Amino acid sequence: GETDFSPRVNIEETKDHLILTFELPGMEKKDLKVQVKDNVLTVSGKRELKDESKDGNTVRSEIWSGSFSRSFTLPETINPEKIGADYKNGLLEIRMDKLEEVKPKEIEIKVS
């Protein structure tokens, strides 16, 4: 039957970027969805398992099928306009640019 699948994810932070890499073996690019709303990044996908039978014998498959969804709250240092996603060889890499400067909460007003 269908199982809920939680992909493994690797989070890497550099000076300028935050990079999330999801392990999604055998997924197709068209079945993946990446969206950002209110500073929450959600990666979801669905995988249909094709029933293969060779010469009338059913081939056992242990590859998962079903759907998954994972959400991450993004730090305020991320620029939501500058997020790129790339999928190849079973790895989905989401690269996020950090804002060049995080605006301070307090603004000093010069008294003239």
Image (cartoon, rainbow, N blue to C red):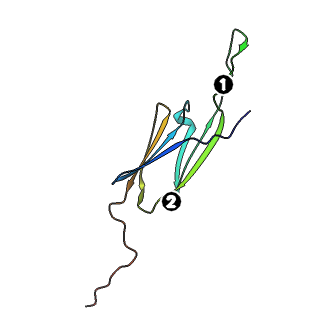
Is 65 situated above or below 83? above
Q: Is residue 45 left or right of residue 76?
A: right
* In-image side of 70 versus 99 (left or right): right
Task: Classify mark 1: helix, strand or loop.
Answer: loop
Q: Quadrant of residue 66?
A: top right
> Which type of secondary structure does the marked residue at label 2 adopt?
loop
> On the image, numbered disc 2 is attached to which residue?
39
Query: Residue 43 location in percent, x, y?
Result: 55, 46
| Residue located 67% across and 19% down the image | 52
**Residue located at (54% from left, 36% from top):** 24
Residue contact at pointers 1 and 2, CB within 8 angstroms: no
Q: Residues within 10 Å of mark 2 (few under 14, many from 20)?
A: some
Where residue 27 sits in the image (x, y, percent)?
56, 33
Viewer-side residue, 27 vs 112 = 27
Q: Identify the residue at image location x=61%, y=42%.
A: 6
List the residue tagged with mark 1: 50
Q: Amino acid at mark 1?
A: Lys
Three-letter residue code for mark 2? Asn
